[in-house]
Image (cartoon, rainbow, N blue to C red):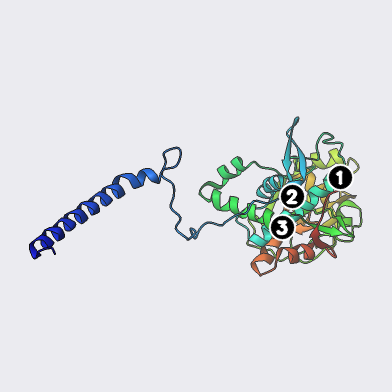
Amino acid sequence: MATRKNLQKRAGGVGVRQVVATALALLLTLFLLPLLMQGEDGAPESVPTGTLPIDRTVVTPGVTADGQVSVTVQVGEGEVLTLPLDKYLWRVVAAEMPASFEPEALKAQAVAARTYTLSKLERTSEKHPGADVCTDIACCQAYITPEEAAANWGDSAQAYTDKITAAVADTDGLAALWQGQPIQAVFFSSAAGRTVNAVEVWGNSIPYLTGVDSPEGEEVPNYRTTVTVPVEEFRTKLLSEYPDADLSGTPAGWFASLVNNSAGGVDSVDVGGVTVTGAALRTLFGLRSTSFTVTADEQLVTFSVTGYGHGVGMSQYGANAMAKSGSTFDEILKWYYTGINVAPYTPKE
């Protein structure tokens, strides 16, 4: 049997070996573990934390309805781009509606823009025969690149980019439909309390483009504007278009028999004995809308104007006012486009 002295020696030896083993383990941990955690390129691999950052959203890649539709866009005079519908719509919404607007208003704008584009895809235009749409607002919809938009938005660029991306994505594939087909989803900036029947502006009666009340008001920038025209300039411009007008005598007597449209704007007015439409006066003198009154003295003809745009279809500031009051994007669309449905639509091949 081992003596007590021998047992103590053995115990002491075991203790030394344990200390040495522990030290070696620590050295391996300190020097070899970082090497084991490096990836193939030598960069440290991230360690899973089990949680996600609270300001990030997990996005699962997938095929979207908009992503499967291609749009050819004539940019300027000759350049033609081909874009997925969602990328094109982002550029339209960013150009057509302030990104500071309510999310539901932006969604309504995205659906209106998508609907307008889908209707363009199914017919050709003499103004851009080599493309589905163009960037001329007199023909199609406004357009801005992401880079240009970001430069305009400054410090809000990322937030506004995300808002418009969400507006397009959250309405993916949805269109405003009448009898199963995309409508003429026209829109404008702001109304003077009510939108206008299409027949009063363009001469064609369209069942879903009828006048409705619109809730925007003094919160709209430049909601009320004034245009003053020197009497001689007014005389020259008007006679160039209406040579039979009699603009002799006192300017205050040139205007008579003003007829209002259904929204309270000017349908027509007699000027020097000739009937002139409100739309013609708007174009001739650069008025923001046909919702105006006119006065004249010996020096100036003065137009007092309310709102901005042709007044038919969806009012953008009205849509934003409705969104602030709790309306959803489809409620906004169904308000401004009478009797339509909001549903998925696949363009014809």
The Cα–Cα distance between marks 3 and 1, rounded to whole angstroms, is: 22 Å
Judging by the rendered image, the residue that carries numbered circle 1 is 349
Q: Nearer the viewer, residue 69 or 196?
A: 69
From the image, state whether disc 3 or disc 1 is nearer to you: 1
Left/right placement of residue 262 relative to residue 145 reads right
In the picture provided, is 189 more to the left or to the right than 203?
A: left
**Residue that sits furthest to the bottom in the current view:** 326
How many C-alpha atoms fall within 10 Å of the one at disc 1: few (<14), some, or many (≥20)?
few
The quarter of the picture where the C terminus appears is top right
Three-letter residue code for mark 1? Glu
Identify the amino acid type marked 3: Thr
Residue at the left extreme?
A: 5
**Residue 128 drawn at (x, y percent):** 82, 36
Mark 3 and 1 residues: CB-CB less than 8 Å, in contact?
A: no
User: At 84% across and 63% down in the image, what residue appears?
Assistant: 340
Pinpoint residue 32: horizontal percent, then vertical percent.
33, 45
Residue situated in front as seen by the camera: 203 or 283: 203
What is the number of the mark on residue 98?
Answer: none
The quadrant where residue 78 appears: top right
- Specify which label sits upstream in the sequence, 2 or 3: 2
Residue 173 is at least partly visible in this image: yes
Real-space Cα separation, disc 2 to disc 3, in angstroms = 9 Å
The structure residue drawn at horizontal position 82% and vertical position 59%, both measured from the top left corner, is: 196
The residue type indicated by label 2 comes to: Asp
- State the count of labels: 3
Dot 2 corresponds to which residue? 66
